[in-house]
Amino acid sequence: MLNQLRPALVLLVALTAVTGLAYPFAMTGIAGVIFPAKAAGSIVERDGKPIGSSLIGQSFTSDRYFQGRPSATSAADPADATKTVSSPYNAASSSGSNLGPTSAALAERVKADVEARKSENPGKPVPVDLVTTSGSGLDPDLSPEAALFQVPRVAKARSLPEDRVRDLVGTQVQGRLLGVLGEPRVNVLALNLALDDLGRK
């Protein structure tokens, strides 16, 4: 029996060392050399200080900024650890809302969000990604249509011409990967940083 057990144990230890240690360390090292920014979390800095990641959305609530998709992530309630509270874009708790298409709570929330959005750009249809959460709750991007929908509000709050803000959105649109993968998108953090730079000029 020992003759049969020894090869199995040796193989287990060898494969664990190769696939569980050597391979991950090698890939992490190679990624750090080839893609240093991405391997470090795609951190965005302003004036030498980290202000976020281009991969994780942030909660922008001021009318002076473009706002991202709603986030359904949560965190432990500080007052009662057995409960949770809303914590938008909480990367430690990435998840969707788990509310299905027949959920009354979801329908009411989306309806309220649509009505609120209509007030900032009357007469225009509200883009779906402005009122629906992503599967991760961390989506950092918007469709170009969702960003353009917010132009009147942002321009008014900053006393800027709408055409100037609309042109800025156009400069931030990222196309499909390799021309075919994904959809055109706008990174909300990058757009808001460009917006702040626009205000300085």
Image (cartoon, rainbow, N blue to C red):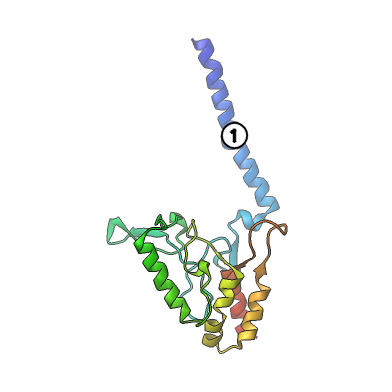
Q: Give coordinates of residue 68: x percent, y percent.
A: 51, 69
Q: Give coordinates of residue 139: x percent, y percent.
A: 53, 62
Residue sitting nearer the eye, 134 or 195: 134
Q: Which residue is drawn at 43% across and 72% down?
A: 113
* Number of other residues with Cα within 10 Å of mark 1, as a class: few under 14, some 14 to 19, many 20 or more: few
Q: Is residue 62 visible?
A: no
Q: Give coordinates of residue 11: x percent, y percent.
A: 57, 23
Q: Which residue is drawn at 64% across and 85% down?
A: 163
Q: Is residue 160 above or below residue 115?
A: below
Q: In this view, does 132 lie above or below 154?
A: above
Residue sitting nearer the eye, 64 or 28: 64
Query: Of the residues shown, which amino acid type is indicated by label 1?
Result: Thr
Q: Is residue 170 visible?
A: yes
Element under label 1?
Answer: helix
Question: Residue beneath label 1, please?
Answer: 19
Q: Number of numbered discs present? A: 1
Q: Is residue 169 above or below residue 160?
A: above
Q: Which residue is drawn at 59% across and 79% down?
A: 196
Q: Is residue 121 above or below residue 137?
A: below
Q: Give coordinates of residue 34: x percent, y percent.
A: 70, 52
Identify the image quadrant of residue 27: top right
Quadrant where the C terminus sits is: bottom right
